[in-house]
Amino acid sequence: AAGLKTALATEAAFRQEMLLFVILAPLGLWLGDDGVERSLLVGSLVLVLIVELLNSAIETVVNRIGPDQHALSGQAKDIASAAVFISLLLAVFVWVSVLADRVT
C-alpha cells in the first residue's frame, strides 16, 4: 500500500495511467462478452500499471546511486521506459482486437 501511495504522490505517469485504468476497467468489464475478454481487457490495463511501478522503482534506484550521468544508468532507465511503452502497445492491441470483433 505504501508503494501505491508513493507512486500516486510522486509519479505523474502512474497517475495518468491510473486515471485511464479507473475509466477503462469498468468499461472493459462491461464490454467483455465473457470472462476471457473481460480478463484480457482489464488485465492488459493492470499490466501497464505493474510495469510502470517497476519502471519507477528502477528510476528511483538509479537516481539513488548518484546524480552523476552514466551510460549504464541512462540505459537502465531507457530499457525500463521501453517496457512501459511495450505494455501500452499490448493494451492497445488487446482493446482493438476485442473491440474490432464488435464492429465486424
Image: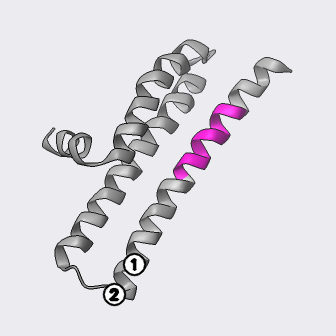
Question: What residue sits 60% from the left and 25% below the top?
Answer: 37
**Which residue does the image show at 18% across and 39% down from the upper left?**
5
Asked which secondary structure carries label 2, the reply is loop
- The crowding category of the residue bearing disc 1, from other C-alpha atoms within 10 Å (few below 14, some 14 to 19, many at least 20), is few
How many marks are shown on the rendered structure?
2
Q: For the view shown, which residue lies furthest in the top direction?
A: 30
Between residues 29 and 57, which one lies in front from this camera angle? 57
Q: Are marks 2 and 1 in contact (CB under 8 Å)?
A: yes
* Magenta span includes 65: no
Q: Which SS does the magenta portion mostly show?
A: helix
Tell me residue 19's x, y (percent): 40, 30
Residue sitting at the far right: 104
Question: Which amino acid type is shown beneath numbered disc 1?
Answer: Gly
The residue under label 2 is which amino acid type? Answer: His
Residue name at image x 51 percent, y 63 percent: 82
What residue is disc 2 on?
70
Magenta span covers which residues? 87-96
Q: Within the image, what quadrant is residue 56 found in?
A: bottom left
Q: Position of residue 21 (x, y in %)?
A: 44, 30
Position of the N terminus, as image quadrant, is top left
Q: Is residue 54 above or below residue 7?
A: below
Judge whether 7 appears above or below 102 on screen.
Answer: below
Position of residue 94 relative to residue 102, above or below, is below
- Distance of mark 2 from mark 1, alpha carbons? 6 Å
**How many residues crowd around disc 2 within 10 Å: few (fewer than 14), some, or many (20 or more)?**
few
Q: Quadrant of the C terminus?
A: top right
Answer left or right for 100 relative to 53. Answer: right
The answer to whether residue 57 is above or below residue 78 is above
In which image quadrant can residue 4 be found?
Answer: top left
Q: In the rendered structure, find residue 74 and report the number of the disc placed on it.
A: 1
The residue drawn where x is 60% and y is 46% is 90
Q: 63 or 29, which lies in front? A: 63
